[in-house]
Image (spheres, rainbow, N blue to C red):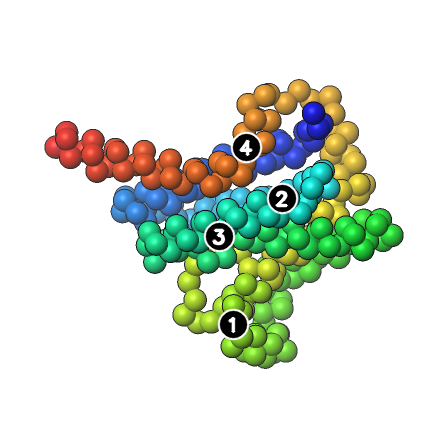
Amino acid sequence: MRKRIKYIDFFRFFAIINMVIYHTYYDLKFVFLVKSPIFYSNKWNILQQYICISFIFLSGVSCNYSSNLLKKAFKLSIISILITVVTVNVSKDLAIYFGIIHFLTVLTIVILFISKINANKINNEILFWIFILIFILFKSGVFYRNEFYNNIYSFMSKLPFSFVLGFPKNDFFSSDYFPIIPWIFLGVSGYYFHRTKISIKVEEFFKDIKIPKIITFISKKSLIIYVLHQVVIYTVLYIYFVIYKNMVY
């Protein structure tokens, strides 16, 4: 049995719990039209970003411990295709053309490629900081305010499937959207985070901490939870708001 990395399980567990909470509130407000000011709160936006960033970063870190990245990428690609087919046929408002699973497929392939050509010839510490800095510059909007970038965007958005790279046309919509740019820089920084001074200290900190089995189990099943949690949440809320309430009233 492969040894579990405690800090990955710990932080991924909290990301999953927060994801379920977030999507529950999302369905309450936008599907079942429950009035709530919570989505207009800055704290709510911070929670959303924390979930996205932690999942992608930890996915990059986890690739260091995967025994077969090609098999992992193939599995993710099948799931992402199914997600697109199902959501497109269910509703245009729920359609997902390039969500987080699509992105993780690309991230896994990219990391598989760089793992073959890199072979630890370049210092992880340097590459981690380079990629995380590029991601921060994108997220802070520095690149987006640059005229050169805007010219590139204008050209790239005219190409087929430009939304995959991060240059969507004005009328593009995907209910879950994680383009390669800028998220690839975060994912790759997670890959290079492995064996940096920070990661070694984090691993040492968690070494003597006993992680409850429920945390390890939920972290281990994160992919299936991600795929199925919205179905479960919607079903529970539908039973309550549509079936139960109609029976009572």
Number of numbered discs on residues: 4
Sequence order check: which comes first, mark 3 or mark 2? 2
Q: CA distance from mark 4 to mark 1?
A: 35 Å
Q: Is residue 87 left or right of residue 1?
A: left
Q: Which mark is residue 81?
A: 3
Q: CA distance from mark 1 to mark 3?
A: 18 Å
Sequence order check: which comes first, mark 1 or mark 3? 3
Q: Quadrant of residue 152?
A: bottom right
Judging depth in this view, the residue of 246 and 137 nearest the camera is: 246
Does the residue at mark 3 contact the one at mark 2 (Cβ under 8 Å)? no
Mark 2 or 4: in front is 2
Asked whether the viewer can see residue 50, the reply is no
Residue with the most extreme right position: 121
Sequence order check: which comes first, mark 2 or mark 1? 2
Q: For the C terminus, give its image quadrant.
A: top left
Residue designated by label 2 = 72
Amino acid bearing label 3: Ile
Residue designated by label 1 = 160
Q: CA distance from mark 2 to mark 4?
A: 14 Å
Amino acid bearing label 4: Lys
Amino acid bearing label 1: Pro
Residue designated by label 4 = 221
